[in-house]
Image (spheres, rainbow, N blue to C red):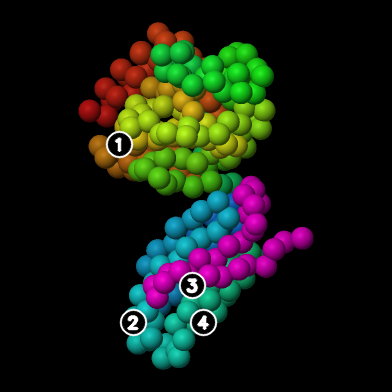
Amino acid sequence: MEQRPEFDALSETSITVNLGKDASPEVHAQIQRLLKELNQNPFCGYQEAVPSYIGVTVFYDPIELVKNTKCRSVSEEVIRLLKERIGLADMHEEKQIGEQITIPVCYDAEFGPDLDHVAKTNGLTREEVINLHTANEYLVYMIGFAPGFPFLGGMDERIATSRHGNPRTEIPAGSVGIAGKQTGVYPISTPGGWQLIGQTPLELFSTDREVPSLLKAGDRVTFKAISKAEFLRKKEVDHGSTH
């Protein structure tokens, strides 16, 4: 049964609407339809909407809203407008959401220092972890934490592993990690606590490109295992094409 939207006023300028209890492709599709509706049919004072796993936080200008609608309660008016947009969004079915992108990954120990730990934690071999990680197609639920960082859902729970208790102070750009039931890729060098199992030679984020982030919410990702020699060759080609 589809859950009724739940609204929470975060501040005088933002409201979060949750469209489900748990992350799922169905809830994600509903979120994408609402984002599209808001951006194509914005209400007075609307500024932007930021998606999460189960909902959207909507930011607005209350002064602009009051000036143009004469409403007595800004939050009640925004909730009314959001309910209206959700109704309109639910009328439109997305036949295709996002692009399908293959990300090459070198799983050598040099690039995946936690691969043995992930294998041991789950009673698997290194090869079994790699096979399970490359077997599934992942949905990009949202971009966050760092510029271009994709939160990917759909990972096989047989390789789920908790974060490090003490995060590393620096993780190389391109590192592929696991945190609980999620997997993701660090687009830039940053501190982080995910279990590192490999590294991609692709640049996931670059201000030299017209669209800096390689991935966006709604894209579907598959990982492909490559050798160290392929990693070095692809890294030279990919980075050389953007600098």
User: Residue at the spot x=46%, y=13% of the render?
Assistant: 109
Q: Residue 214 at x, y = what percent?
A: 40, 37
| Contact flag, marks 1 and 4 (Cβ < 8 Å) | no
**Any magenta on residue 22?**
yes
Q: Earlier in the sequence, mark 3 or mark 2?
A: 3
x then y, percent, for residue 234: 37, 17
From the viewer's side, name the closer residue of 175 and 210.
175
Q: In the rendered image, which residue does mark 1 sit on? A: 206
Quote the CA–CA distance across marks 3 and 2. 16 Å
Picture layout, residue 1 above or below residue 183: below
Checking the image for residue 76, the label placed there is 4
Dot 1 or dot 4, earlier in sequence: 4
Question: How far apart are labels 1 and 4 at the CA level?
Answer: 40 Å
The amino acid beneath tag 1 is: Ser
CA gap between label 4 and label 3 equals 9 Å
For marks 4 and 2, give the CA distance. 14 Å
Numbered disc in front, either 3 or 1: 3
Q: Which amino acid does label 3 sit on?
A: Ala
Q: Point out the tag, 4 or 3, that comes first from the N-terminus.
A: 3
In this view, 125 is above or below 140:
above
Residue bearing the label numbered 3: 9
